[in-house]
Image (cartoon, rainbow, N blue to C red):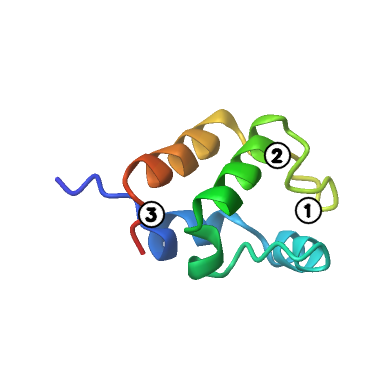
């Protein structure tokens, strides 16, 4: 069984278009693999996700990510940022 977490298959789909547009205004590119695979950028995003301050509350009432999504994001980082 393939347990590799990839950006395109597993991580990118977790961000809504609202999330992406909102964070792009802050020069954070959630839909850009090159940007997100930078350790400093992914660490900053992970801190925001873990603190439940991100994604913004405007995401259609969905609110912050559940713990399983945060764990998946961490697994992507720990798996060396697979595309």
Mark 2, residues whose alpha carbon is within 10 Å: few (<14), some, or many (≥20)? some
Q: Which residue is mark 3?
A: 81
Q: Which residue is mark 1?
A: 59
Q: Quadrant of the N terminus?
A: top left
| Residue at the spot of label 2 | 48
Distance between the Cα atoms at labels 3 and 2?
18 Å
- Residue at 60% across, 40% down: 46
Determine which quarter of the picture holds residue 64. top right
**Between marks 3 and 1, how big is the CA–CA gap?**
25 Å
Q: Residue at x 78, y 37 (%)?
A: 53
- Cβ atoms under marks 3 and 1 closer than 8 Å: no
Q: Is residue 74 left or right of residue 31?
A: left
Specify the quadrant that holds the C terminus: bottom left
Compare marks 3 and 2 and give the one earlier in the sequence. 2
| Front tag of 3 and 1 | 3
> Image point 40% across, 46% down: which residue?
76
Spot the residue most to the front. Answer: 40
Establish if 71 lies above or below 17.
above
Q: On the rendered structure, is 12 left or right of 45?
A: left
Disc 2 or disc 1, which is closer to the eye? 2
Residue 23 position in % (x across, y down):
76, 60
Query: Which element is circle 1 on?
Result: loop
């Amino acid at each position: 069984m393939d347990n590799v977490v990839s950006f395109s298959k597993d991580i990118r789909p977790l961000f809504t278009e609202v999330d992406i547009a909102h964070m792009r205004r802050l020069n954070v590119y959630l839909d850009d693999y090159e940007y997100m695979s930078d350790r400093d950028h992914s660490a900053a995003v992970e801190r925001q996700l873990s603190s439940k301050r991100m994604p913004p509350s405007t995401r259609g009432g969905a609110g912050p990510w559940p713990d399983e999504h945060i764990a998946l994001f961490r697994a992507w980082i720990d798996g060396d940022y697979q595309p």
